[in-house]
Amino acid sequence: MNDLPVRMARHSARHPWRAIAGWFLFVALCLGAGVAVGGTAATSDDFRIGEAGRAEAMAAEGGLQQRPVERVLITARPGAARLDEAAARAAARDVTERMGRLPGVRSVAAPVRSADGSAVRLDVTLKGPELDGKKHVGPLRAQTDAAQKAHPGLRIEETGGPSISKGVEKQRGDDLARTEVIALPVTLITLLLVFRSAAMATVPLLLALSSIAAAIGLSMLASHVFPDAGVGTNVILLIGLAVGVDYTLFYLKREREERARCGGRLDARALVELAAATSGRAVVLSGLAVAVSSATLYLADDVIFSSIATGAIVVTLVAVASSLTVLPALLATFGAAAERRADRKAERAARSGGTARPRRTRRPGRGSGRVTAAMLRPTSRHPAATLCLAVLAMLALATPLLGLNLTDMGRETHSRSIPAMRTFDRLNAAFPELKAMHQVVVRAEPGRADEVTGALRDLARRAESDPHLAGTAHLHTSPDRRISLLELPVPHYVSSDAAQTSLERVRQDYLPATVGRLQGTKSAVTGDVARYADYPQHQKRKLPLIIGSLLLVTFAMTVWAFRSVILGLVGIALNLLSAVASLGLLTLVFQGEWAEGLLDFTSTGSIGSRVPLFLFVILFGLSMDYQVFVISRIREAALRGVPTRRAVLEGIGSSAGVVTSAAFVMVTVFTSFVFLHIMEMKQMGFALAVAVLLDAVVIRIMILPSAMLLLGNASWWPSRGMRRAQENAAPAERPLENVG
């Protein structure tokens, strides 16, 4: 692998226009193939998890699966004293006729009047599976709007799972567009400050955006194997811009350092090869680390995490490919152009009888900036104290994690800027029994259907006296009489304690006392509350397996990259430290209410159940970016015979600038996601931004060098090559003040 980046860079530098054209052809082919073939969206079957999932599968066997339902709500106009019942009945008939004519409508139920008489609703069941309902929302809303115009004395509006999903989808698209408006200019400004060249600053951004385009096309093809749960594009944008810019930045900075170091003695092609031999290798290692770490998400046995893993893997590998192919070609082209300009200037000076001014070449940045030097000074002089204080500070940030409350994010957490959500609130106020539903599903032989329905009626009678349940129970039997389903209304939102208590009673008391006594039957409970409760439990069961695999993968990648077991163990410890510290800050901010106004959210008192796992996996991968880049610099110096202490200080100092710039880009990208409306995306963006900031500043500038200074040559155990290099090291070591 050491020679692969060099060979690819050499070929691209010798044939730059062929490499550039080939890259953009590759991007066009990936995107075109994805659009032509299309993606495969996840179905309801793909989301089934735990007992709720088993119950849904049994219900589907009998054709009793949950179907998409839209609800039309008819109420008095704001300011009216009461609902005009005659007008409401006329409007209900009109809506029923309008909806019944639509091809996507399966049935329209009879109007239902609320208990206080303030509202009338119509339930419109749509054709197709539950997740396909949003495809039919447009025609339904058009008819609802037409009915509103025909009955101006009433308020007629529509809500339901399909319209809310469509509203969330639109909001997500608008939010992502806004993040691009924030992230792209800030990234460009950062790169301009780093390179002081518009041409060089646009290269990382151009390659990142082209990598994202190619990855979107490839992910559409991959979705035929790993169905897309609707989050793939989000992840590609989130990860793609961050790693795409980072990998290009690492490469560009190294090429500039080599150019400054050689003082014009090497041409552009040779400089590109030198950069490929060092940063090119680091980019490959970093990309593989992100990809392999992300792959552990497949172990979650969850379609959402599979989509996240696929998006992260595809965009990371594409970003690595761009850094190895088209980037060397661009650098060689720009370098050759600069050389030609210098030659022409020299020729003009010679013809005019003068002498050309020599090109000003910036000296290579061997040392660190003032801020980094100030942070490294106590690390150099008192590594043990620095290590202890920094670790204690990170553990203090992690303490809120002790009160972590993981829940699934229910429908009621969506932003009220979505019109369907405002109607959702009014619907649930008028019909509280619609807030949630338990569904008890039983499978038995057809001849026992009467026995099963009798037991389910007994269960319904027991539930009638339960204060946590309310409304009329509904019993359904499949045409083949094998599957029976009892619906129990729950007048509480799924996230409430009352709803969770009612689920426990149904599962642990009512079901065992009735249906559970029937031999030869299978039963399970699903519904809104069960889905909400079972998903976090599923994640908690999978978490040890995934974290264990992640630790093993990180250890193996580090040992393979640096031939050091000690650095592998250090890498695991540092990644865990940054992950738990950022998760602690996330808990402190989002489980409380003090930051609601600052970050524009309404606290649910919990953290999304997907967030910790996503954070651990993605952060472990991204942390390898900095770890590989920084330790590679240290290792290069140590292999040249520089004593470990001096190599650590020089390596940290020389890499601090590019690591800080790369971290700033990542933090900017992730922070832009904090301003999304979707709660889990907001939490993920915050957690990753904090984690990257802590990793780049506290871990890489304070804790890592302190640990390596204390370990000394033991850091490289059991590498024989490093041991031989260090045996030949000069005993003298420069103090920090003279580094650079």
Image (cartoon, rainbow, N blue to C red):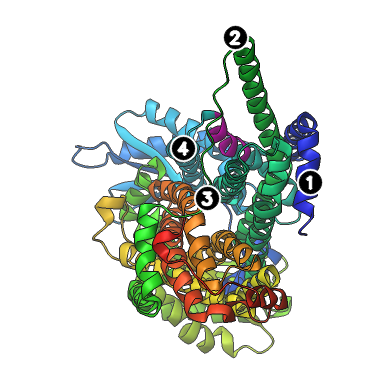
Q: Amino acid at mark 4?
A: Asp
| Image depth: mark 1 or mark 2 in front | 2
Q: Residue at x 42, y 67 (%)?
A: 735
Q: Main secondary structure of the magenta part?
A: helix
Q: Residue at x 65, y 57 (%)?
A: 282
Q: On the image, which quarter does residue 620 sit in?
A: bottom right
Q: Amino acid at mark 3?
A: Val
Precedes in sequence: disc 1 or disc 2: 1
Q: Are marks 3 and 2 in contact (CB under 8 Å)?
A: no
Q: Which residue is under mark 3?
A: 69
Report if the CB atoms under discs 4 and 1 are less than 8 Å apart.
no
Q: Are marks 1 and 2 in contact (CB under 8 Å)?
A: no
> For the residues carrying marks 4 and 3, which lies nearer the camera in this image?
4
Res 8 label: 1
Q: Is residue 203 magenta?
A: yes
Q: Which residue is mark 2?
A: 352
Tell us which disc is closer to us: 3 or 2.
2
- Mark 4 or mark 3, which has the lower sequence index? 3
Question: Do the residues bearing badges 2 and 4 touch, measured as CB atoms within 8 Å?
Answer: no
- Camera-side residue: 282 or 83? 282
What element does badge 2 sit on? loop
Distance Cα–Cα, label 3 vs label 2: 84 Å
* Furthest-front residue in this view: 353
Q: Quadrant of the N terminus?
A: bottom right
User: Quick one: label 4 or label 1, which is nearer the N terminus?
Assistant: 1
The correct choice, above or below, for 716 with respect to 680 in the image is below
Mark 3 is surrounded, within 10 Å at the Cα level, by few (under 14), some (14 to 19) or many (20 or more) other residues, namely: many
| Residue designated by label 4 | 174
Precedes in sequence: disc 3 or disc 2: 3
